[in-house]
Image (tube, helix red, strand yellow):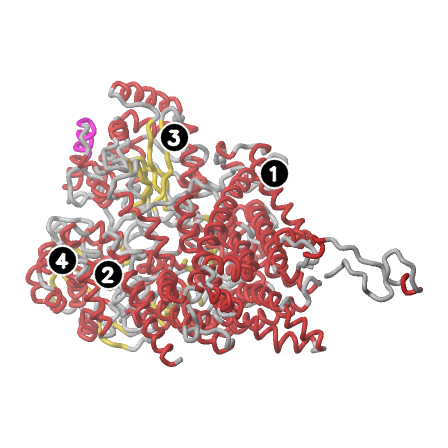
Amino acid sequence: MDMTTNNKPGLHPGGGGSAADDLFTFAEYRHAQAEFTASTEYSYWRSVWRNFLRNKPAVIMSFVFIILFIFTFVAGVIGNYRYDELRPDNKLIFLFPNDEFWFGTDNLGRDYWSQVWYAAQTSIKLAAIVGVGEILLGVVIGLVWGYVRSLDRFFTELYNVVNNVPTIIYMTLIALMVGQSFLIMAVSLICFGWLPTARNIRNMVFIYRDREYNLASRCLGTGLWRILWRNILPYLISVVVLRLALSIPSTIAYESTLSYLGLGLDVNTPSLGILLRNARSYFLDFPYLLIFPAVIVSVITITFYLVGNAFSDACDPRNHL
Amino acid sequence: MKRIFALLLTLAMMLSLAGTAFAEPITDFVTYQTTANEMETFNILYSQYAKELDVLTNCIDGLLSNDNYGNLVPGLAETWETLDGGLTWTFNLRKGVKWVDYQANEKAEVVAEDFLWGLEWVLNEKKNLAANMSMPSEMLVGAQEYFDYTKELPEADALALGLEKFQEMVGIKAVDDYTLVFTCKAPMPYFATLGSYNCLYPVSGKLLAELGAEGMKAVSYDTLWYNGPYTMTTYVQNNEKVLTKNPTYWNKDIQTFNTVTVKMVDSVDIAFQMYQTGELDNVTLNEANLQTIYRSPSHEFHNHLNEARPTKYSYQIHLVYDKKLEDGSPDVAWNTAIANEAFRLSWYYGMDFTNYLGRINAINPLNCTNYCYTAANLVATSDGKDYVQHVMDLIGLQPSSETYTRFDAEKGAAYKQQAMEELSAKGVTFPIQMDYYVQGSNQSALDTAQVLKQTFIDCLGEDYVVMNIKTFVNSLIKEVRAPQLASFYINGWGADYGDPINYLGQETYGKDNAFYSSAYSKIDLATDEDLIAQYKEFTALVDAAAAINDDLDARYKAFAVAEAYMIEHALVIPLYVNISWQLTGVNDYSKIFAAYGIQNNRYINWETNKQGYTTEDYVNFAKVYEENRK
Amino acid sequence: MLLYTMKRLLQSIVTVLLVVTIVFLLLRLLPTDYYFTEEQLIKLTDQQRHDQLAAAGLLDSPFVQLFRFYEDLANLDLGTSRRIQHGVPVTQVIGGKFLVSMRLGLISLAISLFLGVVMGVLQARYKDKFGDHVGTAYTVFVNAVPTLITYSLVLVIGARLFKLPSMYSVRNVARSSILPVVCLSLTSTAGYMLWTRRYMVDELNKDYIKLARLKGLSSRKVMYRHVLRNAFVPLAQYLPYSMLLTIGGSLLVERFFSVPGMGTLLTDAISRYDTSIVQAVVILYASLGVLGVFLGDVLMTLIDPRIRLTSKGNTR
């Protein structure tokens, strides 16, 4: 833009002129402003965060969960009984919650409060580790699987083979030959949990893989990982986040099923799954044995659903305005 | 005055009659079983578990049966006798008994030869895979030899075997169509009691001819032939089975249901739901149900709580005398400790098992006390005194419903002190670690183990012993017993026939057929001389008693002496009998109740009430039962 | 396309064989003691056990056994069951069971698919309004409460209030199937709702929808003609797989209501080491699974022409 001429008829800087002079003023030249092309500074994650915060229920639930998580550590300390010091007592069995036993007692007369909170700690730990591991493994494998055609066959075979052998067989063999412990359970669950995520990601990659902008990228010679990370993954974020959110409660449920079959955690490691399984026989008569662990599991599940959904919605760039 | 009295009496009688008139007997009995106990086979000769035997006992009759006091009564055999002190036994079969198919169509007659076919099947290693052969092979002439013979044959030949070779070798003869003679290896006064056990059951020769050996192995409810009070008309695996009254059954004097439906449920709490909606006629209560009903007098079932009769099993703590650690090396500390008598006696006197018994019977724990190794009701001396009572007289203990009479804190502490001194001198460090194994998926067993652990802590102290609860996944035998990893087992034994040798013979030293010795206690591998001496003494007493064949009373008294010796030296520690609580419309005292055999679950002559019996009713039943005992 | 189909089918057969071989070898990893019942381990001497195993061909090297297994398979002989139903051919054992499971499964699949998709669409339509929250509450509730508890509650309510039979019964199939189908549908419906909503919401945010709205297309046309069709594509992927796997039955529901189906067969067979049943069931599940995945891929391409399964016309 040529600003140094004033050969526009009828326009004199600072000069006098007709009444039209009042309608127009000269714009000043600023170099930085001239180069400016976008309207506002946009940071994806900050937008996501802001969007997420707008969803009140989700924010409230995440607070609730954080408080719950901290409380699992605090509760053991403030309770009347230490978890390691619990002992069976025939005279105290099946007591409803009262002043001394805040959550009542179980079928052996042991304090339920300490049991529930200690189990919650274990379950949350296990679910978190397994969830993160599953997602990492699943996303990486899913992306490669869906994008690199030559590997599609290999991964499909691998998926089919691992998926079609009933997990029970693996879990029984592992339990018999390797043993049962927290670490073993976490590793085994991750090793079998990546499958549905990978498959889901692979299907979505299929959908986006051959869009024109990807063809363009390939033509331009963009590297594999950059395409995956920058072109395709952003479309998948909402799905990934939802999967992560859902894997946490499903790990807790799956661990409960495994305990039901005797393949779960070591008998000395309590977990919400085990408490729920035991409560099943008693809950119609003594509902509190079920209600307390179920409420905690429900709070965890609800939190991750709401937060997951809200975060998922927030991750969609079209919501960022 | 007299008239008023007579009037009142008549009124009372009418009221009580009205009460009984209101008791409506059940015609179509509906009961349940858990799916874990579903049948795996329909061949009664192959079956070794209650899950099949409890059903098949209604379908097929054997030589003998029992009554509700445990006495032997005629079955397919009208009379039986031994004329030479138990060396040969003759059974005279009744005539005109028919084999029918599952819809009660007649197929053939029951003849003596059927029992030969049955025993041949049991002793043929390729046909029956050694199931149920241990007793016939111990007792009958030539049985073990025939078994070994079939073992050597190739499979096809063994399956094709008929009765020729069998009759040559084995001591059983069908003198004519209705007379059966058994020849025992040695005089066995109790051989007849084996007649109610499935190893001597018949199978029709004609059925075998029709199905062939392979077909017989896979026999199902619709291809099986029946001669019992019921036939199975419906069978859906893991869902339900229906037994229908057999109209051709030989015994017209008994009372049966029209149909018996057994519904398979996943667990007892579902069964309780079904009892509440009227879909079942009886249910055993789990801990939670029992507590709820018991605590609340206004509960609809509060007055219908009934204690079941004790099951036929007697449970003990089996101590392991040769234990290994997980790396395969011997657990020297434990092996040394358990060989020490004072150590064992500190358990015997020093442990108050009341809390443990509370896990079995929450309301009357002390009803479950068991101070003897042998189960009650097995045999009695001719004066009517039960064998178990003899043993208890000898050891000087009587069970009480007030306290756990065996517990003696002073003696326990004294023996503990003695044990600690003697064992420390041998270099054993305290506390001694004990490993107890429970199945990982069995929460109830885990809970009971916790209570036991607490009992050890409370009674003997953690400075003395520490009980470690460990788990196995699926198989006790493969994961625990074979590698000898446990310090002790808690197990129960039910008799197979009516003689104390069936119990005591499992614990003897140096014998192949002593089941508990070889499978659990491993006493034959122990090295401690004092321990071995005690076991040898015990075994000698048992052998001496077993040799008495002419005088049953003397025999039983001698066994009692042997058993008292074993208990007083705490070689095995008796623990409990199983008594559960139930809601039921069946009078358990009217059922067959024998300490051995497979007859106990026959649905015949049951006194029933559709409304369910009250606690009062049951107390009455128990009284009447005891009064009518002789 | 036809060529691709043939290729995929061949690959599927290879996969199934691979799976079966792996399971076969895995089972052989267990010590031979597992073939015997507890009673037999007690009663038989080592020599007898050895002889029985040799006679059944179980002592040969795993590869010899594998070869023999494939030989039998070629003759369509799947062996006989050792524990579940002693001596009965495997095909007979499985035969009756899978029809039962399939019937219950297909009914509940139809119900939950219909309800789930419809409610998911409605949820997306009324996003963030009351209806959406109610739907989310339902989904969350069903997933938060452990399934066994949900089933117990359904059983108690159904049996006491509605007087429905507590147990599946062959003699009263229609009435006694109600509670099991309700239980099966409860969880599947929630699943379909959740994912339908997710995919619909993702589609709704796309630009072409904004354009359609601007053009004045009615909400209904937008929803069903455009959004649902696109959102359905990822859902369609799983449909054939789910349908085929209804044969497998649901372990928990079948256990709970004593349904005599396939669901419990696998776990029972594994815990009792009835290897012939385990192998036959694995062959069945593997074949169905692979077939289902393949059909799902084909269905996906049929619905969405932009997806190409073959590599024709692409650079990588």
Residue A112 coordinates in the image, percent (x, y): 55, 40
Residue B46's label in the rendered image is 2
State whether discs 3 and 1 lie on one chain. Answer: no
Residue B351's label in the rendered image is 3
**What residue is pinned by disc 4?**
B182
Q: Name the amino acid, label 1.
A: Trp
Q: Name the amino acid, label 4.
A: Phe
Which-is-in-front pick, marks 3 and 4?
Answer: 3
State whether discs 2 and 3 lie on one chain. Answer: yes
Q: Which residues are magenta?
A: B529-538
**1 and 2 marks in contact (CB < 8 Å):** no
**The disc numbered 2 marks a residue on which chain?**
B
Distance from Cα at disc 3 to Cα at disc 1: 32 Å
Q: Earlier in the sequence, mark 2 or mark 3?
A: 2
**The disc numbered 4 marks a residue on which chain?**
B
Image quarter (top left, top right, bottom left or bottom right) of the C terminus of chain C: bottom left
Image quarter (top left, top right, bottom left or bottom right) of the N terminus of chain C: bottom left
Distance from Cα at disc 4 to Cα at disc 1: 69 Å
Residue C303 position (above or below residue A208): below
